[in-house]
Image (cartoon, grey):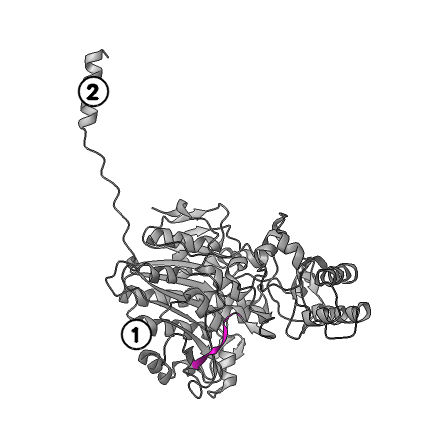
């Protein structure tokens, strides 16, 4: 090409029309934030061939992160739910467990207990103590949507458990609702409003939760088999408690979520930002604790969860249109196999003596220093709280007592892998994956004096010889689903390592609001269109 031809070609290129920008993804009208309590990621592999509803739709149409792990310990309900829409670890959020010993209050507190609030909707409305998100020290996605001043998005949380409804929805939520065993009602607290909304009262008056009285929970693929459980035939506290420990608990949560969408008109406005509905299904956790991850009961409740999600999606499609809904699903933690099941498989594990360990530690400190109650009531593994007043009265250096107590546990207790003192965790030096997860769970003002990690597949306490639990920093308790589906999401399998902490900053980026204040996650931009 000669010089004249070259410059003519350049001129033609400069006059070529610019390529049209890709169309912006549809802006969602609703964020549906789903948590399945105690749902290991491998359930998606184990039972996928039997899914026909919501979980199958998420698997086929969603962005599935196959290697998402919680990066904190302990792996328990309150922390998982506080992480979900905040992106924060306990080191930032201050939510260090389901319960912990509060030194200022001199007693055990829960993650959402609040003496300043009253319970609404239960027996003797307003008479009981309520709950609130005040112990959560960071913002959530819902809070950031509210503070953005772009419209007036609504935020609502629903679950069986108070912490599971309150912590994802955040400080500025329009309401959080949970199930009350004493009344058989969905309840809330005056933190949110002075009186329950009319639609919630109507739901409670309908007694929809009592429709399972006398029902037999039979295996979904073998209705002629002996039932797993038969519901009490009277609407009493026994019935309401038992119902939660079956798939029927998820059914009532789904029904109340439908009532919330209708009553609050969620996803039906025309504002620039979407509403948020955070729904947590707790029955999977109760069934899992009672029976273990390899049980037919867990198999059954998992398949039924697929169906209850299908029902929710079908309802939302009619009300809002699923094309207008950005869905994200995760779990708050996994679970360990039942030790006796593992033994039959020639795998390690067993039931420990965590409760007796604390008694023996207390006796050792009596002999080593002075007689007294060294471990306040309410503490349990993995966190060990010491009596600071007793230590001060005996003029003992706190760090010395912690160090000697930790050394005694390491030397004398079986199946203890590591014991951390407050000083070790405060130093924050790098270590392996277990060290990092324990340190991410450390909040200096609320942390215990010692943190005990037992061996893999060992449960902290001996217990009744059945059932299982969670809370360890190992992958069977930390590996959970993270799935996005809806506007702006590119479906597929994503195998790069991720964490539930990534959910909040990803949603904030997609919705163009500030990232929640304590978020430590990354933006999962590989799945964005």
Q: Is 292 within the magenta?
A: no
Query: Which image quarter holds the N terminus?
Result: top left
Q: Where does the magenta region start and end?
A: 111-119
Q: CA distance from mark 1 to mark 2?
A: 63 Å
Q: Could you say where residue 363 lies in the image, as x and y percent from the top left?
A: 78, 71
Comparing 491 with 388, the one in front is: 388
Residue 418 in view here: yes
Q: Residue lying farthest top?
A: 2
Judge from the rendering whether residue 313 lies leftward or rightward of residue 475; answer left or right: left
Q: Are marks 1 and 2 in contact (CB under 8 Å)?
A: no
Disc number for residue 9: 2
Disc number for residue 263: 1
User: Is 243 rendered above or below residue 56?
Assistant: below
Q: Residue at x 44, y 69 (%)?
A: 166
Q: Residue at x 48, y 46 (%)?
A: 495
Q: Could you say where residue 203 lies in the image, as x and y percent from the top left?
A: 35, 80
Q: Could you say where residue 377 lies in the image, as x and y percent from the top left?
A: 66, 75
Residues packed near mark 1 inside 10 Å, few (<14), some (14 to 19) or many (20 plus): some
Q: Quadrant of residue 33?
A: bottom left
Magenta span main SS: strand
Comparing 344 with 30, the one in front is: 30
Q: Could you say where residue 183 lies in the image, as x and y percent from the top left?
A: 45, 85
């Amino acid at each position: 090409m000669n010089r004249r031809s070259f410059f003519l070609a350049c001129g033609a290129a400069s006059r070529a029309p610019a390529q049209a920008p890709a169309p912006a993804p549809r802006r969602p009208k609703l964020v549906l934030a789903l948590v399945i309590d105690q749902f290991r990621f491998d359930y998606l592999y184990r039972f996928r061939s039997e899914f026909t509803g919501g979980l199958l739709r998420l698997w086929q149409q969603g962005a599935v992160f196959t290697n998402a792990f919680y990066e904190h310990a302990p792996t328990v309900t309150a922390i998982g739910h506080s992480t979900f829409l905040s992106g924060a670890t306990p080191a930032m959020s201050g939510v260090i467990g389901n319960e912990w010993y509060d030194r200022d209050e001199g007693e055990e507190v829960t993650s959402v207990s609040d003496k300043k609030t009253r319970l609404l909707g239960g027996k003797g409305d307003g008479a009981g103590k309520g709950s609130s998100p005040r112990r959560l020290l960071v913002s959530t996605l819902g809070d950031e949507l509210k503070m953005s001043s772009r419209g007036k998005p609504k935020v609502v949380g629903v679950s069986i458990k108070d912490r599971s409804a309150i912590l994802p929805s955040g400080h500025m939520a329009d309401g959080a609702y949970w199930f009350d065993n004493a009344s058989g009602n969905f309840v809330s607290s005056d933190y949110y409003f002075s009186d329950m909304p009319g639609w919630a009262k109507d739901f409670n008056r309908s007694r929809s939760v009592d429709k399972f009285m006398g029902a037999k929970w039979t295996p979904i693929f073998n209705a002629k088999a002996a039932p797993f459980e038969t519901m009490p035939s009277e609407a009493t506290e026994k019935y309401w408690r038992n119902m939660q420990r079956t798939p029927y608990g998820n059914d009532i949560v789904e029904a109340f979520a439908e009532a919330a969408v209708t009553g609050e008109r969620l996803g039906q406005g025309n504002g620039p930002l979407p509403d948020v509905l955070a729904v947590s299904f707790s029955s999977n956790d109760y069934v899992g604790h009672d029976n273990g991850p390899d049980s037919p009961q867990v198999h059954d409740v998992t398949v039924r969860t697929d169906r209850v999600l299908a029902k929710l999606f079908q309802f939302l499609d009619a009300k809002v249109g699923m094309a207008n809904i950005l869905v994200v699903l995760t779990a708050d933690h996994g679970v360990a196999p039942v030790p006796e099941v593992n033994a039959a498989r020639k795998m390690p594990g067993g039931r420990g003596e965590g409760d007796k360990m604390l008694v023996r530690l207390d006796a050792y400190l009596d002999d080593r220093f002075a007689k007294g109650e060294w471990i306040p009531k309410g503490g349990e593994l993995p966190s060990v709280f010491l009596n600071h007043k007793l230590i001060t009265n005996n003029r003992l250096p706190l760090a010395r007592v912690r160090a000697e107590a930790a050394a005694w546990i390491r030397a004398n207790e079986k199946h203890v892998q590591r014991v951390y003192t407050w000083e070790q965790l405060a130093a924050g030096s790098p270590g392996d994956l277990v060290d990092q997860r324990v340190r991410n769970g450390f909040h200096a003002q609320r942390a215990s004096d010692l943190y005990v990690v037992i061996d893999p597949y060992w449960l902290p306490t001996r217990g009744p010889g059945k059932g299982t639990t969670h809370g360890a920093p190992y992958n069977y308790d930390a590996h959970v689903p993270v799935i996005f589906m809806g506007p702006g999401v590119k479906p597929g399998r994503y195998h790069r390592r991720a964490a539930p902490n990534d959910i909040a900053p990803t949603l904030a980026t997609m919705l163009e609001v500030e990232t929640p204040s304590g978020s430590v996650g990354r933006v999962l931009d590989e799945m964005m269109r």
